[in-house]
Image (cartoon, coloured by chain):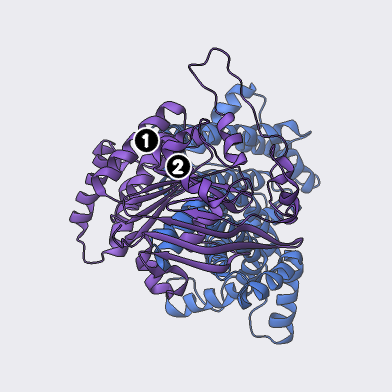
Chain colours: A blue, B purple
Amino acid sequence: MRYVLQRVGFLFLSIWAAVTINFVLPRLMPGNPAGAMFAKFQGRMTPMALKALEAEFGFNNQPLIIQYLHYIGGLFTWHLGLSFLYYPTPVTAVIASSLPWTVGLVGAFTILSVFVGTSLGILIAWRRGGLLDSVLPTTFMFLQSSPAFWVAFMLLFIFGFTLSWFPMSHAYSNSLVLGFTPPVVVSIIYHAVLPGATIFLSSLSGWMIGMRNNMINTLGEDYIVFAEAKGISGGRLLFSYAARNAILPQVTSFAIALGGIVNGSILVETVFSYPGIGYQLTSAVSSEDYPLIQGTFLIIALSVLIVNFIVDMLLVKLDPRVRTGGVSS
Amino acid sequence: MAQVQPVLELTGVSVAYETPKGPVQAVNRVNLTVMPNEIVGLVGESGSGKSTMAYAIMRLLRGNAGVTEGAIRVLGEDIYGMDPKTLKKFRWNKMAMVFQSAMSALNPVLTVEMQIIDTLRVHKPEMSRAEAQRRAGDLLDLVRIERKRLRSYPHELSGGMRQRVVVAIAVALEPDLVIMDEPTTALDVVVQRSILDEIQAIQAQKQFSILFISHDFSLVSELASRVAIMYAGRIVEIARGDSLSLGRRHHPYTEGLLRAIPELTADDVVIEGIPGHPPDLVNLPSGCAFHPRCSAVMDICRTVRPEPIVAGETLMECHLFTKQEVSESGS
């Protein structure tokens, strides 16, 4: 219980740090977003409008601490400013419309990849030296070593462009009105196949090989030999004794890999023009949409922190040693 | 003496590890019997083949190790003639083992109770969960751990408690033979003492045989009725536990080991080691493997390997001894 409270405390501390850095960074840059927008309009904007914009973005000549308090207050009321790119749509609305796509696509396929990779790792370690054990690692190593963008382009070229089996962009068919109806669901899944396959294939082997190595180490542990000697066999030995212990480093790797997932989503969503948060971030950067960049960063930081927290809690459930912090009572 | 069936009977057992340098003969044509309710010690330096022998008896040798000749019988049954299913049942029901590294012999993610119940239920599927739980509590009583520790995870227990749990798991199905491979090596002397006392008490209560493996000579000679001394994969002497003192004649290696035990009551403690190092098992010395380190080496030792001389329950493998001398010193 103490451990859980500690983690919750740490979660809030890191959220505060992320929020603060997110506030400080744009203010360290020369100029301000309102100025950038003013320049974009090439004199067709009056100084009055500029003043109004600056006020809107919170870039006025008030002391930093006041600006900071305004910013924090804005967060609590879920007000992150207006996007330039989609002016005058609020940043929160842009994020709200793109975040579900990323969570759905990247989240689902990453979890699928972790699940399948880990299961395959258990299997090939258990049948070490078997046919699967010699074929799978080499095959997936090849996929792993090819860069994700290359895999994405190849899939796009072969299955999208040449064979036309799958759509080449967007998250669902333009002819449909978004809603929770069967044709829309089918269309969403159909559109998710290629970007999903990219995410799945480019991370699968890491999970598989990692789990295989953990398993092989665990299978050499004394408690496995002891369990085998005392008669435990089959599924019980494989799961409760071997895999239950081998999976622990895997969970930690997952937490570490989360940061990379964001990178992956930027790449995949850009290649497949998928309307997720990564795609929004790239468009925001290329059109110097500061509020949107800031808001996106904030959301990415928050998601990584929250998922890390969930993984921490999962680890508590899986490893009794974490609960007491490894100290014997 | 009436025909009593030995609990453990090794006849001419050899175990070899396949290595790139060639086969390593870890156990070399060993003969040993353990009678019902007997505690037999097995002593030797690191690398003399003690643990390998224990794993061979349990048929737990893995990878590149294998029994190359001889037969191992437990309660008259050939361990290597069993099909895997029979072996799985036989192991732990009839013979169990306490591992050298008891500290790491418990699964860190399961409670003590689960690990005991697993053992019971895999061999007795008809046993109800409640009954298995009750048995688990009884077993903890037996090794003198509070019952509330059933809910503990291994990392919440001290080293001595973990070792006791492993002993409890080993005797869970009341086997006839328990092999204990250095069960107290990782513990301090006080805990060591109390665990040994408990092992002796449980053994007296439950009536089983123990093959006690250790490199602690004084510990074994106190505990065991007979002690087998192993050198370079061979048993060079089997002596009665109470005869193990410097006043009696022994194998030169045994005498070397005896001289290495400090005497607590002596005014001047003189400890002598045995000069040299244990031999390379890939390239054993000719003749008697011990001859390069032996203080009483003769010409014959360098070329001819001594044959084991068996006298009753004792054994001697040294050119210094005649059959008559062995039977006299062994009685």
Whether residue A326 sits left or right of residue A282 in the image: it is: left
Residue carrying label 2: B183
Which mark, by number, is residue B10? none
* Residue drawn where x is 53% and y is 75% of the image: A189
Along the viewing direction, whichever of B328 and A17 lies nearer the viewer: B328
Work out which residue is located at the far top of the displayed protein and give it: B267
Whether residue A166 sits left or right of residue B172 in the image: it is: right
Which mark, by number, is residue B195? 1
Along the viewing direction, whichever of B141 and A68 lies nearer the viewer: B141
Q: Quadrant of residue B260?
A: top right
Along the viewing direction, whichever of A306 and B316 lies nearer the viewer: B316
State yes or no: discs 1 and 2 in contact (Cβ < 8 Å).
Answer: yes
Q: Quadrant of the N terminus of chain B?
A: bottom left
* Callout 1 crowding tier (Cα within 10 Å): few <14, some 14–19, many ≥20: many
Q: Quadrant of the C terminus of chain B?
A: top left
Whether residue B267 sits left or right of residue B206 in the image: it is: right
Amino acid type, callout 2 = Pro
Chain letter of disc 1 in the image: B
* Residue drawn where x is 26% and y is 46% of the image: B139
Amino acid type, callout 1 = Ile
